[in-house]
């Protein structure tokens, strides 16, 4: 039995209340709160990026479990900061991991965290003494004054994968669906994603039904054997659309009210791309309802497009291993910004490119981006964080 033993959340230093964005756009705030299911979005300080997010999420895991059994670090992201060097190699140094840890970055839009989990399961199956550290981390960025602007956000979730897992045992069967779709992508010379919003929603739902059909064809469990579903949440209302689609596709009566505990963190993070599904899982497990022994379906979708339905069973005693207070604190301690400050941060993000520059201290996260020297990015620990 192999699966997830620990889950830890990190996000940006700042938060924007979406009511401010609605007011500036002349939009009814209920459109964001109810129509999209989003209340806030995380905004990065100038000295934060996907490396600092990933390292901040993983640090509590390393502090709790040590590094002796970790031989692989997989960082999944579509917000990479270099075309060659893996985000994971900086994370590896910031965490003080041993040199005997293989490190790589994985990419397929919001799906890559799930690919990381699958790779980790395979590694542990070959050698059950090993643990794999999987970090899903992203910064969701669209152009301002677009329909997608309120669905930005940022976040990272670190997971420890091992044999005899403390939280969730992942079932051997999963369902997969890949199709070449131009619904969302980010060309190498673009700082923001390009998106066809309507197509992206229908491509997501097609991937869900395709993954479900494949899951069943592979011998997966019947719909009645699932207690809960977590979905990738580009905006939390998407989980409701997905649940309705699955109900229609399978003919089952699925209770939409059971989705709410999966949406609490993502309503406040915004889209965290590849971290989003795992933030939904953390949110569900952190809810006081006891899910011991229950089977959970996890639907991962990454535009472009790859979907996968992964399933797992919640372990006895899982509540002793949760980080509910820490995860909530990460959200509560963000510093609010007004619309003008958010827009200035959005415009400035990455504007200096790879020219030499220093970035002043702003974040209170454990790690920070310090600037660029000789075309190389520099990261450091934050004193007292
Ligand atoms: P939009 O223009 O805001 O859409 O764009 P809308 O006008 O249809 O409104 C959205 C909903 O708000 C509708 O509800 C309205 O009825 C409702 P629905 O019909 O969908 O149930 N509404 C209101 N509700 C209450 N009070 C009101 C009110 N007014 C309207 N007053 C869109 C929405 C998602 C297209 C846009 O935000 C977008 O382009 N977002 C980015 C793309 C995206 O998130 N796609 C999701 C699927 S693709 C995916 O998940 C992958 C991704 O994460 C990337 C990756 O894989 O890396 C994006």
Image (cartoon, grey):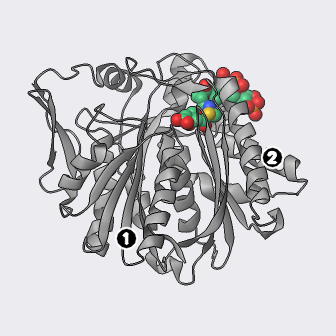
- Image point (33%, 61%), residue name: 72
Q: Which quadrant is home to the C terminus?
A: bottom left
How busy is the neighbourhood of tag 1: few (under 14 within 10 Å), some, or many (20 plus)? many
Select label 2 or label 1 by which is in front.
Answer: 1
Q: Is residue 72 left or right of residue 319?
A: left
Q: Is mark 1 within 8 Å of ligand 1?
A: no
- The disc placed on residue 244 is 2
Query: Dot 2: what SS?
Result: helix
Location of residue 130 by image quarter: bottom left
Q: Please identify the quadrant where the N terminus is shown.
A: bottom right
Tell me which corner region of the image, top left, top right, bottom left or bottom right, holds residue 327. Answer: bottom left
- Residue 373, label in figure: none
Where disc 1 sits, the SS reads strand
Residue 81 image point, x, y percent = 29, 33
Q: Which residue is mark 1?
A: 131
Q: Is residue 18 left or right of residue 370?
A: right
Name the one closer to the observer, 160 or 53: 160
Q: Earlier in the sequence, mark 2 or mark 1?
A: 1
In the rendered image, which quarter is residue 363 located in?
Answer: top left
Does 314 appear above or below 366?
below
Q: Would you say the beta carbon of the disc 2 residue lies within 8 angstroms of ligand 1?
A: no
Residue in the image at 25% along x and 51% along y: 91
Identify the residue at image location x=84%, y=51%.
247
How far apart marks 2 and 1 lie (CA) works out to 37 Å
Q: Is residue 275 above or below residue 59?
A: above
Instruction: Report whether residue 313 is seen.
Output: yes
Measured as percent of width and height from the top left, residue 121 is found at 49, 65
């Amino acid at each position: 039995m192999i699966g997830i033993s620990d889950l830890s959340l990190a996000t940006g230093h700042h938060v924007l209340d979406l009511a401010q964005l609605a007011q500036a756009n002349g939009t009814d705030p209920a459109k964001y709160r109810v129509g999209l299911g989003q209340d806030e979005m995380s905004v990065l300080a100038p000295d934060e990026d996907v490396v600092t997010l990933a390292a901040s999420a993983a640090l509590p895991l390393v502090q709790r479990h040590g590094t002796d059994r970790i031989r692989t670090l997989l960082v999944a992201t579509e917000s990479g900061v270099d075309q060659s060097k893996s985000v994971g190699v900086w994370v590896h140094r910031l965490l003080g991991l041993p040199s005997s840890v293989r490190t790589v970055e994985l990419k397929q839009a919001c799906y890559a965290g799930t690919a990381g989990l699958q790779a980790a399961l395979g590694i542990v199956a070959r050698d059950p003494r090993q643990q794999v550290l999987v970090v899903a981390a992203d910064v969701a960025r669209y152009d301002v004054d677009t329909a997608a602007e309120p669905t930005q956000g940022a976040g990272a979730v670190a997971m420890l994968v091992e044999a005899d897992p403390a939280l969730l045992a992942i079932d051997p069967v999963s369902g997969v669906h890949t199709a070449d779709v131009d619904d969302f992508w980010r060309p190498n010379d673009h700082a923001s994603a390009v998106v066809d919003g309507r197509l992206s929603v229908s491509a997501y739902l097609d991937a869900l039904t395709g993954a479900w059909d494949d899951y069943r064809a592979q011998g997966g469990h019947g719909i009645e054997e699932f207690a809960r579903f977590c979905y990738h949440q580009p905006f939390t209302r998407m989980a409701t659309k997905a649940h309705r689609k699955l109900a229609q596709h399978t003919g089952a009566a699925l209770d939409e009210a059971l989705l709410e505990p999966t949406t609490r963190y993502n309503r406040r993070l915004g889209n965290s791309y590849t971290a989003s599904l795992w933030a939904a899982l953390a949110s569900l497990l952190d809810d006081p309802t006891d899910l011991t022994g229950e089977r959970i379906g996890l639907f991962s979708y990454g535009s472009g497009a790859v979907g996968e339905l992964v399933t797992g069973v919640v372990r006895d005693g899982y509540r002793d291993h949760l980080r509910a207070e820490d995860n909530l604190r990460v959200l509560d301690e963000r510093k609010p910004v007004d619309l003008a400050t958010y827009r200035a941060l959005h415009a400035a993000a990455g504007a200096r490119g790879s020219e030499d520059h220093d970035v002043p201290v702003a974040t209170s996260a454990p790690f920070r981006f310090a600037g660029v020297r000789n075309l190389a990015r520099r990261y450091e620990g934050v004193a007292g964080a």
